[in-house]
Image: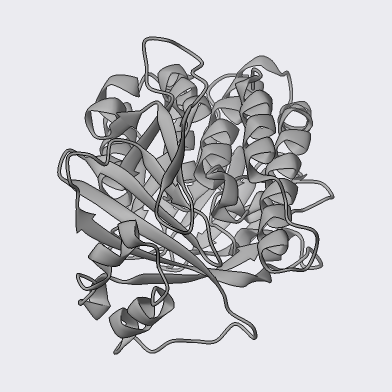
Amino acid sequence: MKDLRVLIIGAGIGGLTSAVALRRKGFQVDMIEKDPEWNVYGVGIIQQANVVRAMAQLDLLEGYLDSAFGFDFVEVFAPTGQCVARVPVQKLDDRYPANVGISRRTLHEFLGESAKKAGATIRLGITADAIHDDGNEVSVRFSDGSEGAYDIVIGADGVYSKTRSQIFPDAPKPQFVGQSVWRYNFEKPADVDCLRSYEGSIGIGLVPLADTLMYMFVTTPEPGNPRYPREGLAQAMRAKLADAPPGIREYVGQITDDDEVVYKPLERIFVEGRWHKGRVVLIGDAVHATTPHLGQGAGMAIEDSVVLAETLEHETSVEKAFAAFQARRFERCKFIVETSVAICEGQLGLRPPANQAEAMHKMFAVTAQPI
């Protein structure tokens, strides 16, 4: 298909990469984002070889790697603090790193500028109040009173997707998995040159983001999904690390700024039914939000953007394009969600502990396959 008018709802990672991918195909792209400030929390994210490949397919790789810290190993530490393994990570292309760590703010800014340069229009502080699909086009009434007509609408508006609720009111709702994650940025010492993963009663990791920046993530059981007030959040995170291994203990005293602690309950959703209705389709966390145990949540959204642009270009109708998109993405995304949640439930004692090394090895094999 050619000359499609596309509305993307949500200007996060999946929405922005979709905007770039669709503009590369020559489609007209409008985006709306409900946050008038277009903020993103300021810690980091791990992205793996399949994301590096997808960024190359989007013709974004050079700027992406310039903004990130690449690494080819994962170090595993025992609860005593001893490094027990330095494991090489599978590459998909020897010219590029196997993994990257990147600041979420840096990634957000890079993708936002890339979408604008590609020719997408982005309006902030706007939502879609009504979506009407008459079979030939989609009429949208926006929260500022304006209206628009589009050939397709893409819901990239996250785990609490309003678009999902509008087109599939009976779709499943996000479920809390019993764990939460705490994140905090630190100055990176020179010897932290890859992901460091610490085994123990809680999950802890250090991820390099730049030559002088890294972040720590901590996953903790949180029965009942408690809410922690902003004031005192740093103290609460320090308390969670009271029994941390020696390699982590040295950083605990640096956790002092409540506003810099990012605390997030972990939720999951996987829509087993159709991901589209008529001319409206859902991508990313709107249909397959996962926990971070495999580090693939954003990666799946980025892959979605590549595949959806390809199917819209090559198929002869919107229905065929959306069906082909889901067919290519369904099993891969389901594997990521289910395997990540299985690791989480093993850590919580809800099932036998998962062999995380085996799960990671299988994940690398699955994501190495073409998308």
1 to 233, vertically: above or below: above
106 to 146, vertically: above or below: above
Please tell me which residue is depicted at 61% across the width and 37% down the height of the picture: 151
13 to 264, vertically: above or below: above
Q: Nearer the viewer, residue 169 or 236?
A: 236
Q: Nearer the viewer, residue 52 or 301?
A: 52
* Quarter of the image with the N terminus in it: top right
Please tell me which residue is depicted at 43% across the width and 24% down the height of the picture: 98
Q: Nearer the viewer, residue 117 or 60?
A: 60
Q: How many marks?
A: 0
Residue 318 x %, y %: 71, 31
Q: Quadrant of residue 69?
A: top left
Residue 29 seen in the figure: no
Q: Quadrant of residue 215?
A: bottom left
Q: Residue furthest right?
A: 273
Q: Is residue 27 left or right of residue 112?
A: right
